[in-house]
Amino acid sequence: MSTRSVVTTALVLVTLGLVSPVYAQESGAATNNAGLVIQWSIVTAGFALAIAAGLGALGQGKAVAAAVEAIARNPSASGDIRANLLLGLVLIESLVIYVLLISLIVLFLKPFGGPTVG
Amino acid sequence: MDLLHHQLWVTEAVNAVFGPIAAAILRAFGREVPHGNVIPDYLAMLLLITLVLTIFSLIVRSRLSVENPGRLQIVLEDFVNGFHSLLDDFVGPKGRRYLPLIGSMFLLIWLSNLAGLVPGLMAPTSNLNVTLGCALTVWVFYHVQGVKEQGLVAYLKHFAVPPGSPVAMAPLMLIIELISHVARVMSLTLRLFGNIFGEELVIIILASLVPFVVPLPMMFLGLLTGTLQALIFVILTMVYLGAAVTVEHHDEAHH
């Protein structure tokens, strides 16, 4: 069994493990829809932000690495490089910020039902 | 989220003075008058910041001198010089004429971001309406300047046939360009709002867990993000402005 298939199997098992208590609860209390929404809101908001932050950090890391390398090669161009780096970092970061906003909406405003907090 | 809604003395003061007038205007236009404060927190804070900036500028202007510049004047001259060089870089040789809007936008957003860190005040930019207002102002401004600079027909042609793209691509490019221009408003609005609102939320959550010392590093971070986001907002404005006012044959000469 290759490493990839082991990882895939583990991920599928973990996902099933996450899902099964929810199904169990749903069959137990079929009318408890609001509780389900709250549960999934928390899970969704947390996972969305975690994925967004991780991938965003990966992208920003690549950008910073390239910029530092470029400055080391040609220190006289550091002003231009820094300006472009800042611009690029902000554009990457704004995508993560969108996900943050979506998480906040899902967590606090609950557009798909469930009681609103605040 | 209840923590976000506490009474500010600014709001109360502004409502005590202007509240009845605002309510009368709302009624004259047939709008519903809200219970409690007619003028919301963020508008009161914006009024306060505008007032502070105006008074500060008037005082500084009355003390300007060529022979004997004070310390404050030197700092402000550095500020203006910094913005001149940014405008030269991002907009081009004719960029310096846009200093009034760019500079005051920066000061307004910067002070708005930092106001959230002062106890008893709130950051107006942590409200979506304020950031949308800033973004729309900038958006309309750069389109108007583009039309002024290139003429209406040339500016509209710029959408369909950007420099370097074949004419056959025009229908596709028009859609792409239109979407990208509309998305600029959204991205400017949401970036500023998300940063400032998220930062305030983190500080509030930390302060509600441990009220002492622990929020301080986040507040320091807020100082950095507040300044950076204000700078980013005006830099992006300058980039858009530069793309709008640059006359096309300059580009073709470069390629």
Image (tube, coloured by chain):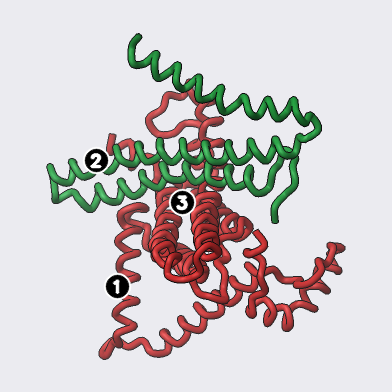
Q: Nearer the viewer, residue B194 or B236?
A: B194
| SS class, disc 3 | helix
Picture residue at 48% right of the left edge, 23% below the top? B169
Q: Chain of mark 1?
A: B
- Going by the numbered disc 1, the residue's amino acid type is Asp
Q: Chain of mark 3?
A: B
Q: Colour of chain B?
A: red
Q: Residues within 10 Å of mark 2 (few under 14, many from 20)?
A: few
* Chain colored green: A
| SS class, disc 2 | helix
- Going by the numbered disc 2, the residue's amino acid type is Ala
Q: Quadrant of the C terminus of chain B?
A: top left
Mark 1 and mark 2, same subunit? no
Picture residue at 56% right of the left edge, 74% below the top? B121
The answer to whether residue B232 is above or below residue A59 is: below
- Residue B97 visible? The answer is no
Residue beneath label 3, please?
A: B149
Select label 1 or label 2 by which is in front: 2
Q: Nearer the viewer, residue A43 or A70?
A: A43
Give how far across and how far down residue B209 sits, in percent: 53, 62
Give the number of the disc on residue B26.
Answer: none
Mark 3 and mark 1, same subunit? yes
Q: What is the CA distance from the residue labelled 1 to the residue labelled 2?
A: 31 Å
Q: Quadrant of the N terminus of chain B?
A: bottom right
Q: Nearer the viewer, residue A25 or B60?
A: A25
Picture residue at 65% right of the left edge, 29% below the top? A22
Residue beneath label 1, please?
A: B78
